[in-house]
Image (cartoon, grey):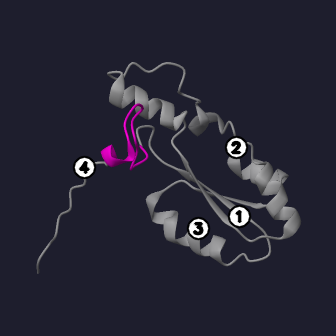
Amino acid sequence: MTNQELATCAIEGAPIKVAVINNGNLGMVRQWQNLFYAERYSSTDLGTHAHRIPDFVLLAESMGCVGLRCDAKDEVDDVIKKAMDINDRPVVIDFIVGKDAQVWPMVAAGTGNDEIMAAALSISIQRG
């Protein structure tokens, strides 16, 4: 939430890997507005896809880390490999995803962990 941990990891040489799943919004707030408030969105769009605010690559570099960005599905493996090859300092990968990408599983307010919500998943198996 504050990114100060990145500075500590860089100072200590901890080669952690951080994945930012960047949907260009205040993601969890938008998800709640989508699921519980009939898509009445309010003040969640950060416009980060157009303006890169915050620019997580530059933020990572300002903290002494390596910053990488992945803009497309076909780049995922290459970017992850590049990150895994860096072992002398932290790496932050800014994965750009669609504005409606959500985080699962989740627990709604006022419910217990026994009422965990998960996304519906459709799996198609092709047989040859």
Q: Going 42% across and 30% down the picture, which residue do you hit?
A: 32
CA gap, disc 4 to disc 3? 28 Å
Give the amino acid at mark 1: Val
Give the amino acid at mark 2: Asp
CA gap, disc 4 to disc 1? 31 Å
As helix, strand or loop, the secondary structure at mark 3 comes to: helix
Residues at badges 4 and 1 in contact (C-beta under 8 Å)? no
Label located before the other in sequence (4 or 2) = 2
What is the quadrant of the C terminus in the image? bottom left
Residues at badges 3 and 1 in contact (C-beta under 8 Å)? no
Residues at badges 2 and 3 in contact (C-beta under 8 Å)? no
- The residue that mark 2 highlights is 55
- The residue that mark 4 highlights is 120
What is the quadrant of the N terminus in the image? top right
CA gap, disc 4 to disc 2? 31 Å
Q: Main secondary structure of the magenta part?
A: loop
Give the amino acid at mark 4: Ala
CA gap, disc 1 to disc 2? 14 Å
As helix, strand or loop, the secondary structure at mark 2 comes to: loop
Percent of width and height locating residue 87: 74, 77
User: How packed is label 2: few (under 14 Cα within 10 Å), some, or many (20 or more)?
Assistant: some
User: How packed is label 4: few (under 14 Cα within 10 Å), some, or many (20 or more)?
Assistant: few
- The residue that mark 3 highlights is 79
Disc ID at residue 91: 1
